[in-house]
Image: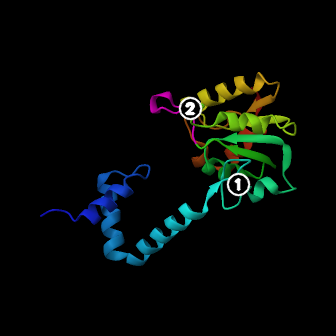
């Protein structure tokens, strides 16, 4: 008996999520359809609403519903410091530490030549323009301590140093190979406070 195409399409759609393979996607599909149809409807509405209303902030590149997000407009933030992170989840983790009160720039990824992700795909020119605005005095590189994160930090450091911008790197209070999103707030706070010139 053939699997209905709508069912097959839902399984395939769920596989786009990180860490979700064919069996997990199939389990999620059957669960939503059989045991939680309201949850499935809510998920569909939330995805549709997010896709229709979210955009990238013109200053920090994070997701927002406005042209410039609330964080970037806040007078309580220090505009002289710009912390560069890979993903919005990394920004959220940094915020939970309460160790940083400057502004952010979210790369939405990291350099990964094997995956075809280079400086152009990450719009490094936008970051460079943001860091060269005359207000930013220090760029803090808070990319993950993975090979790709280190390569990204090195590339950005060279690019920013060439324009006379002070660059620092978060300390290695985090285990090598770890991702900021999964670290506890105390470790991230310590790494942030012990950052060094880069």
The image shows residue 188 at horizontal and vertical percentages of: 68, 44
Q: Which residues are magenta?
A: 109-117
User: Is 31 drawn above or below residue 129 in the view shown?
Assistant: below
Query: Which quadrant of the structure image shows residue 175?
Result: top right
Dot 2: what SS?
A: loop
Residue found at x 84% / y 52%? 77
- Please check the rendered image and state whether residue 114 is part of the magenta-colored stretch, yes or no: yes
Label 1: few (<14), some (14–19) or many (≥20) C-alpha neighbours in 10 Å: some
Residue found at x 61% / y 51%? 89
Q: Quadrant of the C terminus?
A: top right
In primary-sequence order, the first of circles 2 and 1 is 1
Labels in figure, total: 2
Q: Which mark is residue 4?
A: none
Colour setting: rainbow
Residue found at x 37% / y 53%? 15
Query: Which quadrant of the structure image shows residue 159?
Result: top right
User: Is 37 drawn above or below residue 122 in the view shown?
Assistant: below
| Observer-nearest of 129 and 43 | 129
Looking at the magenta stretch, what is its main secondary structure? loop
Residue bearing mark 1: 96
Residue bearing mark 2: 111
The image shows residue 42 at horizontal and vertical percentages of: 47, 73
Is any part of residue 102 visible from this angle? yes
Q: Quadrant of the N terminus?
A: bottom left
């Amino acid at each position: 008996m053939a699997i209905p195409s709508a069912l097959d399409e839902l399984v395939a759609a769920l596989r786009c999520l990180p860490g979700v393979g064919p069996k997990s996607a199939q389990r999620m599909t059957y669960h939503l359809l059989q045991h939680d149809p309201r949850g499935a409807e809510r998920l569909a509405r939330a995805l549709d609403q997010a896709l229709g209303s979210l955009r990238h902030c013109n200053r920090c590149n994070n997701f927002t519903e406005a042209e410039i997000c609330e964080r970037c407009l806040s007078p309580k933030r220090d505009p002289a410091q710009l912390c560069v992170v890979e993903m919005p989840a990394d920004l959220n983790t940094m915020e939970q530490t309460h160790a940083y009160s400057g502004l952010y720039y979210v790369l939405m990824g990291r350099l990964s030549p094997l995956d075809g992700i280079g400086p152009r795909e990450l719009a490094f020119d936008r970051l460079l323009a943001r860091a060269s605005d005359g207000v930013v005095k220090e760029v803090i590189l808070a990319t993950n301590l993975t090979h790709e994160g280190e390569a990204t930090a090195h590339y950005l450091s060279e690019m920013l140093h060439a324009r006379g911008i002070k660059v620092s790197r978060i300390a290695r209070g985090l285990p090598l190979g770890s991702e900021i999103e999964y670290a506890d707030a105390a470790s991230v706070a310590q790494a942030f406070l012990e950052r060094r010139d880069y």
